[in-house]
Amino acid sequence: EPEVTQTPSHQVTQMGQEVILRCVPISNHLYFYWYRQILGQKVEFLVSFYNNEISEKSEIFDDQFSVERPDGSNFTLKIRSTKLEDSAMYFCASSEALFRRRTSGDSYEQYFGPGTRLTVT
Amino acid sequence: GNSVTQMEGPVTLSEEAFLTINCTYTATGYPSLFWYVQYPGEGLQLLLKATKADDKGSNKGFEATYRKETTSFHLEKGSVQVSDSAVYFCALEATGGGNKLTFGTGTQLKVEL
């Protein structure tokens, strides 16, 4: 069964450093997402991406964050200058489509990767 | 704004016990509701979903019914197994909100022999 993969599984970095988290979405999917979960808190939406541009972003996704699909397979999240509060589990997800099917009301399932644990020291 | 509240864990049960994990939500319109499960070392997997009021989602013996009058989507299973030990996340997708998911904090379930 196709799956979303993420690398690395754990990243330790010093405050102020740049980090790039990598994701390989499922090959025929068109929509890509990043979520994060700070330890003990809710999983939070960061950004969605389609057709090489951001579709939607949360208030968390400020100028320190950027996303890119540098080639046909990878989807990356970059944090330019990490802060202690960026320490979290980061999940990548992908889906076939974005909009709810108008007739059935079904949503296209988002498939999640295993996550990258980012620790900022 | 939209939000999901689910019961805090961890929940520890004996094998074959009945499971309920409570989930309530706040949203405008008619959101779709989901339960995701995360097994150790793996990503979030969709367990079940319901897209309109009174729908019942079910999978692998788990069930949840979309109750609009109580804004709830409680997860139940009649007889849990050790292999059900995982973290369970309740989530919603708001109408007109693209596919952005709003999650609860997750509830860790541990099933013992």
Image (spheres, rainbow, N blue to C red):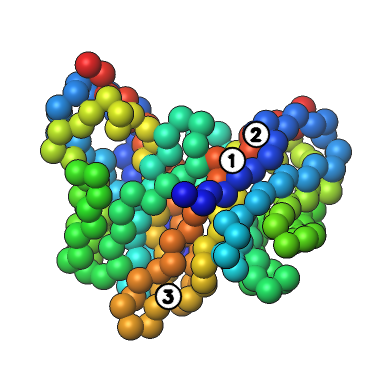
Amino acid type shown at disc 3 = Arg
Question: The residue tagged with tag 1: helix, strand or loop?
Answer: loop
Q: Among all residues in the image, which is located at the extreme top?
A: B113
Give the SS element for disc 3.
loop
**Looking at the image, is mark 2 or mark 1 earlier in the sequence?**
2
Of the image marks 1 and 3, the number of the one nearer the N terminus: 3
Give the labeled residue for mark 3: A100
| Residue B81 relative to residue B25: left or right | left
Label 2 to label 3, Cα distance in Å?
32 Å
Q: Are marks 2 and 3 in contact (CB under 8 Å)?
A: no
Check disc 2: other Cα within 10 Å, few if <14, some if 14-19, many if 20+: some
Tell me which corner region of the image, top left, top right, bottom left or bottom right, holds residue B69: bottom left
Quadrant for the C terminus of chain A in the image: top right
Could you tell me which residue is drawn at 37 percent across and 32 percent down? B86
The residue labelled by disc 2 is A9
The image quadrant that residue A31 belongs to is bottom right
| Cα distance between the residues tagged 2 and 1 | 7 Å
